[in-house]
Image (spheres, rainbow, N blue to C red):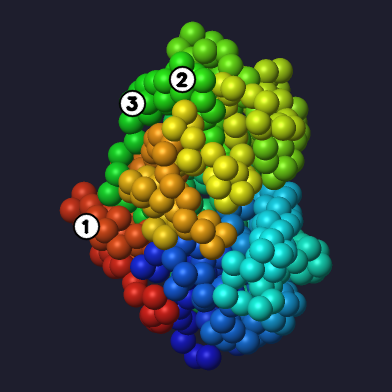
Amino acid sequence: MSSSSLTFLGGAGTVTGSRFLLDLPGDTRILLECGLFQGSRELRRRNWAAFPIPPSTISAVVLSHAHLDHCGYLPVLVRQGFGGAVHTTPRTAELTAIALRENARLMVDEADHANAVGWSVHDPALPLYDDEDVTRALARLVPVEHDTPVRLHGARLSLHRAGHILGSSWTQLVLDAGKTIVHSGDLGRSVHPLLQPPVPLPGADVLLVESTYGDRRHDDNATLDDLAKAVTRTADRGGRVLIPALAADQIEVIVYRLRELRQAGRIPEIPVYADSPMGLAARNVHLDAIAAREAELRPGLTRDTIDPSWVRELTVAEEYHPCVIVSASGGRVLHHLLPDPRMTVLIAGFAALGTRARDLADGATSLKIHGRYVPVRAEIVSLPGLSAHADAADTIAWLSTAARPPAVTYVVHGEPDAARALRDRIHDQLGWHAVVPRPDERVLL
C-alpha cells in the first residue's frame, strides 16, 4: 500500500468496541485497541462476525489498558488467525489476563446456564470464547514500559501514562515516513484518587481522542454526598447496597471512596463485602504496585488505602443485612435483589446504551434477565462521577498541553451526543480541526 490510512472498525458512533486500524506502507497493519462490543444486541452481534480483514494480515496490536471495551476481543482475534505481538504495559498485561479470564468464565457460565434452563434462542448456547482461547491470546502479550520507545514495524512506539487505571497509557507512534499519530486511549482524571494525572501531550499530526464524558462534568462533592446518602438510607431500612464492579479496577476506587466516608463519619460502619474474583485479583496487582512505589501512583498510598481490614470476601449474601456488596456477578445477583424494595443498586461510573446498568439508570421498571422479566423495586442510584474517566474539562486541559496542534483530531469512543459536544468544544476553545468519524470509515493520513 503506497499511502497510509486509518479505519475506524469500532469505537466510532459508540462508546465501546474500540478498534482502530492503521494501514502503513510495506503491507504493515497496526491495530490500536482490540475491544469488545458491549451494550445493545446489534453491537454485541459484531463480536460474532468475521473480522473485516484477515487477522493474519495484522502486524501488531497495541492495547492502552485492560478494560474489556479495549482488550476484550483479543481472544477472538487470535483464534481467527492473528499471530503477532500485542504491545502494552506490564501492569496492563497483568490486568488484561485477569479481565479476560474472568470474562471467559462468566461467558461459559452464562452459556451453561442458558442450556440448562433453556432461555437462549441459540441451541446450544455457546460462549464467545473460553479459557483456552484466553491462554492463546495472553501468549501474544509483549510488555512495554511507560516512556520507553520500541521499534514497531516502520514506526517508533511509545506508551505514556494516561492516569485512567493502573498501567493505562496513551499511544504515540512516530512513523518512519515522518508523521506522528497519537491515540489517547481512555484518559484519567486530574484528581484520580489513586493515580497521577496523564502525561502532557507533546504534539501530533493525527490525534484520536476519546469522548466518553465529552458532554459532562464530574462533581466530586456532589458524588460523595449522593454516595453517603444512598448508603445511609439503605442501612436505615435494613437493606443491602449492591455496587456492580464490572471492570478490573473499580473495586479499588469504590473501597477508597467508602473509606473516605467512613473515616469522616458520613456513613454507618456496616459490613462491606467483595464478591468479585476479578476485583480481588486486581487488588493484589494494585498492592504490588503500592509496595513497589510505582511512579504512576499518587504518593502516600498504603495497603490500607484499597484493602482495609473491614472489607471481606463475600460467602453467603443472604446472611448480611444491612451491608454493601461490591459484585461482578451480574444477572444472577440482580435477579434475586432487584425485587427487594429495601435494596439499592448503585451504578458507579459510565453506563453505556443498551446495558442493564443504563436501563436501570434511565428508570426501567423491569429487566429481562435469563428469559424472564424481573420487577425493579429496589432503589436505583446513578453516580457517573464515580468514574476514572476524564470529563470534558479534563480532556480539553490535556489537549491544551500539546506543543503544537494536530492537523486533524478524530473524536472517538463516545456516544454520538458526547462525541459531537467534544468536537465542538475542541473547535471553539482550541481552534483545532476536529471530526467525528463514522463507523467503519477509512481516511487517509
Residue at coordinates 41% horizontally, 51% vertically from top-left?
Answer: 366
Contact between labelled residues 1 and 2, with CB atoms less than 8 Å apart: no
Question: Helix, strand, or loop for circle 3?
Answer: helix
Question: Label 3 belongs to which residue?
Answer: 222
Q: Nearer the viewer, residue 302 or 119?
A: 119
| Labels 2 and 3: the sequence-earlier one | 3
Question: Helix, strand, or loop for circle 2?
Answer: loop
Label 1 or label 3, whichever lies nearer to me, is 3
Question: Label 2 belongs to which residue?
Answer: 237
Judge left or right: residue 377 versus residue 106. left
The answer, for residue 207, to whether it is visible in the render is: no
Residue at coordinates 66% horizontally, 64% vertically from top-left?
Answer: 117
| Labels 2 and 1: the sequence-earlier one | 2
State the count of labels.
Answer: 3
Mark 3 nearby-residue class (10 Å; few <14, some 14–19, many ≥20): few
Residue type pointed to by label 2: Arg
Judge left or right: residue 425 versus residue 262. left
Residue type pointed to by label 3: Ala
Residue type pointed to by label 1: Asp
Mark 2 nearby-residue class (10 Å; few <14, some 14–19, many ≥20): few
Contact between labelled residues 3 and 2, with CB atoms less than 8 Å apart: no
